[in-house]
Amino acid sequence: MIYCFPPAPTRSLPIVNSAQRFPVNRIFCVGRNYAEHALEMGKDPTREAPFFFMKPSQAVVDCETPTSIDYPARTSDLHHEIELVVAIGVGGRNITAAHALQHVYGYAVGLDMTRRDLQAVAKHAGRPWEFGKAFAQSAPIGPISTVQDVGHPAQATIELMVNGVTKQSSNIDQLIWSVAESIAQLSLYEALEPGDLLMTGTPAGVGAVVAGDVMTGSIDGFGQIVVKVV
Ligand code: MN
């Protein structure tokens, strides 16, 4: 194969207790998956079918060590959304919830950074969310903890601090659609592939950050990430 120019590099994430890295394929995200966050976004938190959106793999920022992201263009309302990230290791379609966890390679802490103003304009106009969600450096993610190491925790505190002040604090047991159910639903629409990531939604407390702010995100058992906006 001779390319006309060098292809974009494969984005990857470190794996805890391993010299190997996890090559990122696609990034799927669940919308409004914690009741309190659905309410703060002005939506009914009843258990309607989950919906999904995507980010390009190029959005990934490796947060193995404290890192920084650039404040993106064309927004004045950049929001943090702390999320449990599921790393898919085994592909499949029409996966049942009962079998879904067998497709999981591991878990990580991630941020679904959002240009909320652009997302709001798109929502009201009935346009796609992409430019509110799928921009460069919009998915800072920490190292992947493998299922072999941490199993499939059903409960864990999930928190985000900005400059040391807690802004988001909940528990992953508050997910409206569990990890298994989210995988099952997603796999009805698209065959999952090894390397896919699933960002499972954010709890209440989303808000804006500005250049100079330091975000510290954590999920008990999955470590923490430290991301400065510059
Ligand atoms: Mn989100």
Image (tube, helix red, strand yellow):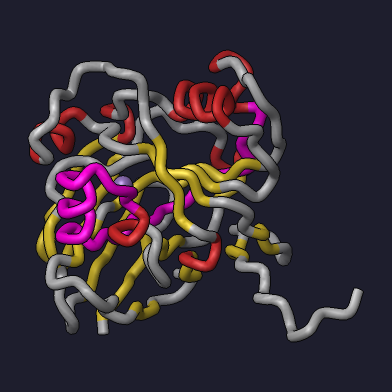
Where is 179 relative to 146, above or below? above
47 is within the stretch colored magenta: no
* Rendered image quadrant of residue 104: top right
Q: Position of residue 115 (x, y in %)?
A: 23, 62
Number of marks in picture:
0
**Residue drawn at (91%, 74%) of the image:** 1
Q: Which residues are magenta?
A: 102-129
125 is within the stretch colored magenta: yes
Q: Quadrant of the C terminus?
A: bottom left
Where is 202 relative to 15, above or below? above
Where is 100 relative to 15, above or below? above
Q: Which one is in front, 213 or 158?
A: 213
Q: Position of residue 172 (x, y in %)?
A: 32, 34
Q: Which one is in front, 149 or 32?
A: 32
**Relative horizontal placement of residue 140, taking residue 113 as reference (left or right):** right
**Residue drawn at (26%, 59%) of the image:** 114
**Residue drawn at (8%, 35%) of the image:** 42
**Residue drawn at (26%, 53%) of the image:** 81
Q: Is residue 120 visible?
A: yes
Q: Which one is in front, 169 or 204?
A: 204
Q: Is residue 111 visible?
A: no
Q: Which one is in front, 213 or 122?
A: 122
Q: Position of residue 181 (x, y in %)?
A: 46, 21
Where is 20 relative to 37, above or below? below
Q: Position of residue 32 (x, y in %)?
A: 26, 35
* Rendered image quadrant of residue 39: top left
